[in-house]
Image: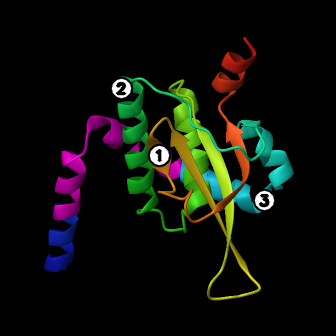
Amino acid sequence: MMPMLGALRRKAATFLRQPLFIQAWFVPLWLILGVSKALIFTVSFRRLAPRLGQKSGIAPWLPLLSPSEEARALLIGRAVRLTAKYTPWDSNCFPQAIAARLLLGLYGLPYILYFGLMRDPDDPAGMKAHAWVAAGRVRVTGGTSFGQFTVVGCFVSPLLTQVARG
């Protein structure tokens, strides 16, 4: 019982050292990741895709952000990745991408959500899929994926499509 109490105390102390932004978003993000995971299993991609952003083909490009916007995008990515570690379900790249997209949109930050594929080296007939989100130079979720995965689809922030048209 004592080792478990010590571990709980350490985790609480680590959590309290996190920025207030991450502390405030932890529980809502935990719920968002759960809802995202449920949507992925229950809603077809065709119906989910319009809520990811504006489809923009496969041309990878990144929006420019101000330094303060980049700092916010970094915090959002950190909060999503940290929270994903503490879900009892597997919050892999797709639920994380949905959660990041939601927060970036909420804060009015332009983003691009990418989907990519690569051949699975362990299964010559198989493929691996990945989703990642970038905002400016910030890799919000999904890490450095451009070198490994072939982009097969992009969804851009509605903010970016409005700027491009106007």
Of all residues shown, which one is farthest toward the top? Answer: 166
Quadrant containing the N terminus in the rendered view: bottom left
Query: Residue shown at 32%/42% (left/top)?
Result: 23
SS of the residue at dot 2? Answer: helix
First of labels 3, 2 by sequence position: 3
Residue 88 point in image, percent of width and height: 49, 68
SS of the residue at dot 3? Answer: helix
Task: Locate residue 89 relative to residue 115 in the image: left or right.
Answer: left
Give amino acid for label 2.
Answer: Pro
Q: Main secondary structure of the magenta part?
A: helix
Name the residue carrying label 2: 67
Give amino acid for label 1.
Answer: Val
Task: Locate residue 147 relative to residue 139 in the image: left or right.
Answer: right
Q: Which mark is residue 105?
A: none
Marks 3 and 1, Cα distance to the nearest angstrom?
A: 25 Å
Quadrant assignment, res 72: top left
Give amino acid for label 3.
Answer: Thr
Query: Residue shown at 65%/49% (left/top)?
Result: 114
Name the residue carrying label 3: 42
Quadrant containing the C terminus in the rendered view: top right
Name the residue carrying label 1: 140
Quadrant assignment, res 148: bottom right
Task: Name the mark nearer the viewer: 3 or 1.
Answer: 1
Marks 1 and 2, Cα distance to the nearest angstrom?
A: 15 Å
Residue 50 point in image, percent of width and height: 79, 39
Task: Name the mark nearer the viewer: 3 or 2.
Answer: 2
